[in-house]
Image: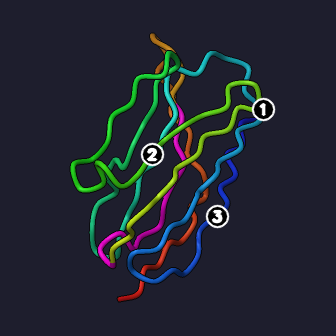
Amino acid sequence: QVHLVESGGGLVQAGGSLRLSCAVSGVRFSINAMGWYRQAPGKQRGLVARITSDGNTNYADSVKGRFIISKDNAENTVYLQMNSLKPEDTAVYYCWIISTPPANTQFWGQGTQVTVSS
């Protein structure tokens, strides 16, 4: 069974930094991409950043230049370094992976709360 376990969330003041980690286990297929989504109260879940198996990245416009996604293939772990945090970054952050085509099966972590105070 696939498990995605996030860590690193918490409370931080505006302008501060946090680093999220997501350890993936139980995978018996090739991972096409890994990433992070977030959901704020009353809003839909949306992409924050993702990284493909060959290292290509893309980011939501709102976090470009502030957040950096990276991964450790050997440990099946994906990270999100969040700098210059703003109150509007407050949300539950979810780790995400997707298998290679044609299955394109998605898996989600349980979420970790990030709260940025002004």
Circle 2 or circle 3, nearest the eye:
2
Asked which secondary structure carries label 1, the reply is loop
Taking 56 as reference, is 78 above or below it?
below
Q: Which residue is mark 2?
A: 68
Q: Residues within 10 Å of mark 3 (few under 14, many from 20)?
A: some
Q: Earlier in the sequence, mark 1 or mark 3?
A: 3
Q: Residues within 10 Å of mark 2 (few under 14, many from 20)?
A: some
Q: Quadrant of the N terminus?
A: top right
Residue at the farthest top position:
102
Taking 9 as reference, is 96 above or below it?
above
Q: Provide the residue span drawn in magenta.
A: 87-97
Q: Is residue 36 magenta?
A: no
Residue at the (24%, 56%) spot, across then down: 62
Q: Which residue is mark 3?
A: 8
Q: Residue 82 at x, y = what percent? A: 46, 59
- Distance from disc 2 to disc 3, alpha carbons, whole Å, reads 15 Å
Residue at the farthest left position:
61
Inspect the image, locate mark 2, and give the three-letter code of the amino acid beneath it. Ile
Asked which secondary structure carries label 3, the reply is loop
Q: Is residue 92 magenta?
A: yes
Inspect the image, locate mark 1, and give the three-letter code of the amino acid beneath it. Gly
Q: In the shown orientation, is residue 22 left or right of residue 82? A: right
